Image: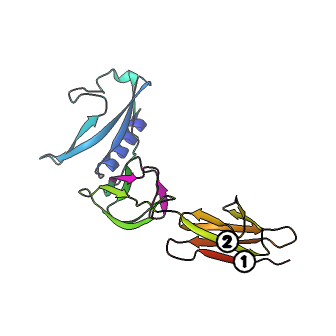
Amino acid sequence: MVRKIILLLAIFCFCLTSNKLYAAAGLFFEEEISAEATNNIIDDNGEVNTTFEINGYSEDTDPLSVPKKDLDIYFSVSEINGDSVSVDITLYPADAELIIDGKPFENNQLIPLAAGNHKLQVMKTGYSTLDTIITVSPENKEFYFKLSAIAPVMIEILTVPLHAQIMLDDKPEGYSNTSLHRYPGKYTLKIKKPGYKVIEQEIEISADGKKQFFFRLKR
């Protein structure tokens, strides 16, 4: 029992240096609640008094007012980062891919980010890609980005000899020397014809760039 109290006090004192403390209490070994330290006040005697907000309880409810023999208390720190900001990013279209500082994120939830500048990318086939820098702070934590729709581009893939099988991103797209409509972006092109070596390479389709791609197959 003494050992448990010492461990509890050590964790509690460590967490007081943070802006937020999340704690969990198991009442009768069955119910879990969470508590957030919202205010630390140093009184005239130099003692720290901490105010807790208990999720699921009114302010005048004391969740610890049960017989101590039936109470097991444990603390688990889930946030010790005063610089973290919960950022709300809304995208249109809603299912666009969101990448922040090179890491993918879901765009339908709050995202914890450190205060400061972050590189943001938003991508979706059929829309122009957005590359920008956002500055995050406690006062600047809500962002909205709308992608601009783009039209598909007509391209031609020409080969010698004719009638070679065309595949884009491993999907059959018919045969060479015919027109295709695709959105701007990068694709893996594969060209196959019996008796000839397979050609495989990455091509980039742009709205105002190259529209024809020519390949000569080799045996």
SS for callout 1: strand
In the rendered image of this protein, does residue 25 appear above or below residue 37? Answer: above
Which quadrant would residue 66 be assigned to in this image?
Answer: top left
Which residue in the structure is indicated by mark 2? 157
Q: Position of residue 86 (x, y in %)?
A: 33, 51
| Disc ID at residue 215 | 1
Q: What quarter of the picture does the N terminus occupy?
A: top left
Q: Position of residue 174 (x, y in %)?
A: 72, 61
Among all residues in the image, which is located at the extreme front?
178
Pick the front one: 11 or 155? 155
Q: Earlier in the sequence, mark 1 or mark 2?
A: 2
Pick the front one: 17 or 191? 191
Among all residues in the image, which is located at the extreme left?
44
Q: Which residues are magenta?
A: 86-108
Q: For mark 2, does the 10 Å Cα neighbourhood hold few (<14), some (14 to 19), or many (20 or more) residues?
A: some
Pick the front one: 58 or 196? 196
What predominant SS class does the magenta segment belong to? strand
Pick the front one: 28 or 137? 137
Q: Residue at x 37, y 57 (%)?
A: 146
In the rendered image of this protein, does residue 215 appear above or below residue 64? Answer: below
Q: For mark 1, does the 10 Å Cα neighbourhood hold few (<14), some (14 to 19), or many (20 or more) residues?
A: few
SS for callout 2: strand
Mark 1 touches mark 2? (CB < 8 Å): yes
